[in-house]
């Protein structure tokens, strides 16, 4: 075990790695309840999604630990699940079953791109500034979703959005939860987001905002409502030309979103651990295979795109340096399968603080962007601001990848760009012209 994970080379041991695995799990355990809550709005069975979430996280993280040997955990991605529900299902009108099949197809395509080394080359060709901007933009989008769910931000005819009634039950409970979570995080409590959700749920029960659960531990719920739904419902749709075009839009958009979301997260966590050398990640191909495989497996189980988690940085911060930490995290996700009764107490007011805090953590990457250089600042800004304002992660990514080559060429730095960036420029032009709904 020591030789396989290279404990000596990485200056670590079983104790450090186990603590790192536990820390990462506590930091991202909220996804077990947040993901079912978000996907339930798309019409999916919440209990089945809970099981799919835990299994996808456990299997994906295990593959990452054994294949890539990185202390990076995977789970259905925040931002990607919001995109699945709010953009694909609710806005584009694509049934959730077909959306799952779109996730499956995107994962298969990713495996192919990864196998031939194409995905790794593209990721290494993306400038650091755009990676940071994509991460920050997704953070803002997630926070916006959280504020909406808690009714802290509401629709307004004159200004599009405005401040909600903070004295209302959901908004007040979410505000309390946000305060508690901020205190815990500021004090450096490991798993502060998870504990913040627990305290918020308990407070909601005490004041009568949330119905108490009948039990805490139970058998594993049935995954039947979502398992294989990506395939069993394919014959239920009329595959005419317009429907096929709509499906292609879904697949390509999942490709765009997951491709760069994963790139940003892998880069950020690996950089913190000291794995990145010359803007390149060793064993990136294996890490991407783990990510792609987890997406395929997750779509079959019944959940949106599975991806690397920025919360893995919590485990890295306490000394995690090898894939053994990921194995510990995976085992804890399996154990969590027996706590499904708690789903009933995790309302949108309870999940809102988690979404807002995760958003804040992701936005912190903005500090790494050279804002004094206009050719970098403009594309980065457009990437970040477009995601929440257009309610589309894909649109924000496209904006940045179009304007970055333009500003670099105008400042005489066009030759510094990898040719792949120019190819992406035209791809995203096509995205705007033909693929946006």
Image (spheres, rainbow, N blue to C red):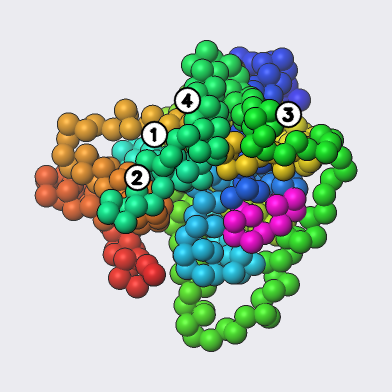
Q: Secondary structure at mark 4?
A: helix
Mark 3 sits on what residue? 328
The residue carrying pointer 4 sits among few (fewer than 14), some (14 to 19) or many (20 or more) residues within 10 Å by Cα, namely few
Query: Could you classify mark 2 by the number of other residues whose Cα lies within 10 Å: few (under 14), some (14-19), or many (20 or more)?
Result: few
Compared across the picture, whether 62 is left or right of 70 comes to right
Query: Where is 195 relative to 154, above or below?
Result: above
Q: Closer to us: mark 2 or mark 1?
A: 2
Tell me whether the residue at label 4 lies in contact with that at label 2, contact meaning CB atoms closer than 8 angstroms: no
Lower position in the chain sequence, tag 4 or tag 3 = 4
Nearer to us of marks 4 and 2 is 2
Tell me the residue that label 1 is attached to. 363
Q: Nearer the viewer, mark 4 or mark 1?
A: 1
Look at discs 3 and 1 and give the one toward the viewer. 1
Q: Label 4 to label 3, Cα distance in Å? A: 20 Å
Q: Earlier in the sequence, mark 2 or mark 1?
A: 2
Per the model, the C-alpha gap separating discs 4 and 2 is: 37 Å
Query: Disc number at residue 336?
Result: none
Question: Which structural element holds mark 2?
Answer: strand
Q: Is residue 186 left or right of 392 when viewed as pictured?
A: right
Disc number at residue 272? 4
Q: Which badge, 4 or 2, comes first in the chain's sequence?
A: 2
Say whether residue 129 is left or right of residue 286: left
Q: What residue did someone put label 2 on?
A: 162
CA–CA distance between discs 4 and 1? 16 Å
Q: Earlier in the sequence, mark 2 or mark 3?
A: 2
């Amino acid at each position: 075990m020591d030789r396989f994970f290279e404990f000596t080379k990485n200056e670590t041991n079983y104790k450090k790695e186990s603590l790192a695995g536990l820390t990462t799990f506590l930091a991202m355990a909220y996804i077990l309840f947040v993901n079912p809550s978000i996907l339930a709005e798309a019409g999916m069975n919440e209990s089945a999604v809970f099981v799919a979430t835990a299994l996808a996280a456990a299997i994906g993280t295990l593959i990452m630990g054994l294949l890539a040997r990185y202390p990076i955990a995977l789970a259905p991605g925040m931002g990607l699940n919001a995109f699945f529900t709010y953009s694909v299902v609710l806005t584009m009108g694509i049934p959730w079953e077909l959306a799952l099949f779109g996730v499956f197809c995107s994962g298969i395509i990713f495996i192919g791109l990864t196998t031939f080394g194409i995905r790794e080359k593209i990721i290494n060709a993306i400038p650091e500034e755009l990676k940071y901007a994509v991460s920050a933009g997704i953070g803002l989008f997630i926070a916006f979703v959280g504020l909406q769910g808690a009714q802290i931000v509401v629709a307004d005819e004159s200004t599009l959005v405005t401040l909600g009634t903070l004295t209302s039950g959901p908004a007040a409970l979410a505000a309390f939860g946000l305060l508690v979570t901020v205190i815990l995080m500021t004090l450096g409590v490991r798993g502060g987001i998870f504990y913040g959700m627990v305290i918020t749920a308990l407070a909601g029960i005490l004041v009568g905002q949330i119905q108490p659960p009948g039990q805490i531990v139970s058998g594993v719920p049935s995954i039947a409502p979502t398992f294989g739904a990506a395939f069993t419902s394919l014959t239920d749709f009329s595959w005419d030309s317009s429907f096929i075009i709509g499906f292609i839009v879904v697949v390509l958009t999942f490709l765009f979103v997951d491709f760069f979301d994963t790139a940003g997260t892998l880069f950020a966590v690996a950089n913190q651990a000291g794995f990145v050398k010359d803007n390149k990640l060793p064993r990136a191909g294996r890490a991407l295979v783990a990510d792609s495989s987890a997406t395929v497996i997750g779509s079959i189980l019944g959940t949106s795109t599975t991806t690397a988690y920025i919360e893995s940085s919590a485990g890295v911060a306490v000394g995690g340096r090898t894939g053994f930490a990921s194995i510990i995290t995976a085992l804890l996700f399996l154990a969590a399968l027996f706590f499904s009764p708690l789903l009933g107490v995790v309302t949108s007011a309870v999940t809102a603080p988690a979404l807002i805090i995760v958003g804040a953590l992701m936005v912190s990457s903005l500090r790494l962007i050279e804002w004094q250089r206009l050719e970098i600042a403009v594309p980065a800004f457009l990437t970040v601001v477009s995601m929440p304002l257009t309610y589309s992660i894909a649109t924000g990514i496209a904006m940045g990848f179009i304007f970055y080559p333009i500003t670099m060429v105008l400042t005489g730095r066009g030759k510094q760009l990898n040719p792949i960036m120019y190819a992406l420029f035209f791809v995203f032009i096509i995205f705007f012209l033909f693929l946006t709904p």
